Image (cartoon, rainbow, N blue to C red):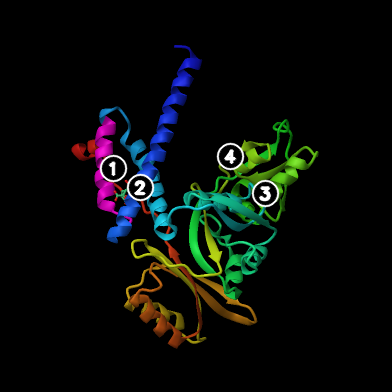
Amino acid sequence: MDLQSLRTRIEDVDRRILEALAERREVALAVARNKAEKAGAVRDTEREASLLLRLMEHGTELGLDAGYLTRLYQIIIEDSVLTQQAWMQQGDGSGSLSIAHLGTAGSYSHLAAQGYANRRQCTLQGVSCETFNDVLKSVEDGNTTLGILPIENSTSGSINEVYDLLRHTHLHIVSETYLSVEHQLLVSKGDEDKEIHTIYGHPQAIAQCSRYLSHLENVKVLSCPSSAHAMELVATSKEPGIAALGSQSGGALFNLVAVAQNLADQPGNQTRFILIQREACHVPQQVPARTSLIMATHNQPGALADALIILRQHELNLIKLESRPMPGNPWEELFYVDLAVHEQSPQWQDALRELKAMTRFIKVLGSYADERVKATRVIAPEQKSGA
Ligand SMILES: O=C(O)C(=O)C[C@]1(C(=O)O)C=C[C@@H](O)C=C1
């Protein structure tokens, strides 16, 4: 067979894989409907383990590598769990979702908003904003139903500006979503061989690629309000030797080409985004929840430890604890806390009552579906027999 015919065969196989994946997602939605009727939990790790084991046995018979199959199915199952969780909260997708995001199409916030809408079978009606504060205002003023904000990154840590904004808003966190952020160095087509003298990027992208950027000599690194701004600047400028930090899909949108890839200091760079809305949401019991709050303890020794003891006494699992300086009160701290709990659970309500009595200030920012899907692991069949 010639190369073209072989490629046509591969395309045919890929089309069938895609159709099978879409069918699997449909069946996962039917499973969610079934579980909603019976109030069953979305996640069933025993079922996942037996499924993975069977797939590995069958796959290895077909000559496929067990490690490859595990990685592949962990992604497929994660998609299934997140699709079911989204359905449990929102039901069947209807129409469009208006979401305010930082930057124009192609920015990481826009990509995250797109992924959020897709997961809910909705089309995205995105509204571009210049600043995080504008995202908040868009939702507060009722111009959009939702706003999306990056809150932390696996390489550069918390995004303090967003934490500071959350303190003053009456909006609620209603969801979270994770985006794999693979930074690329993008230049205009035809400029691939030109020596780069200036790189534009959002401060977060610059921070996440700090190691790569520190090795470049005679290159200016300049901040832009968003990654989309950086890419647009490069795409519209006639000046050779300028580049932007951005994503692969953003680069494609602006007709730019990558001259370097995977630039983040840490592999598997991910950003966690939160979605904010005017009304709080309800997380069904079948879906694991995360509750976020801000608190200020009294300025006395052991005050934070006392608050943490309350959480322990109520067996509450602390996911995140972050401190921020309190404006106007030098050396006093506000604490941002994330807990793995449903807001309406009696366990949390009791703890909240006790915390209110011993803190100066406490505000629940929201309770929403926990989108961290910890991969189920199984021992591959050959490894088992070899052990
Ligand atoms: O079998 C189920 O209960 C499903 O919900 C389907 C499925 C899957 O995608 O295979 C998804 C989530 C569960 O944790 C287990 C398996």
The x, y position of residue 36, in whole percent, is 33, 58
Residue at label 1? 52
Mark found first going from the N terminus, 1 or 3: 1
Q: CA distance from mark 2 to mark 1?
A: 16 Å
Q: Is residue 184 above or below residue 149?
A: above
Q: Is residue 198 visible?
A: no
Label 1 Cα crowd, 10 Å radius (few <14 / some 14-19 / many 20+): many
Q: CA distance from mark 2 to mark 4?
A: 34 Å
Q: CA distance from mark 4 to mark 1?
A: 32 Å
Quadrant of residue 56 within the rendered picture: top left
The x, y position of residue 315, in whole percent, is 32, 73
Magenta residues, dominant SS class: helix
Residue at label 2? 28
Dot in front, 4 or 1: 1
Quadrant of the frame with the N terminus? top left
Residue at left offset 37%, top offset 64%: 284
The x, y position of residue 65, in whole percent, is 32, 33
Mark linked to residue 228: 3
Label 4 Cα crowd, 10 Å radius (few <14 / some 14-19 / many 20+): some
Residue type at mark 2 is Ala
Quadrant of residue 14 within the rendered picture: top left
Residue type at mark 3 is Ala
Give the SS element for disc 3: helix
Q: Is mark 4 within 8 Å of ligand 1?
A: no
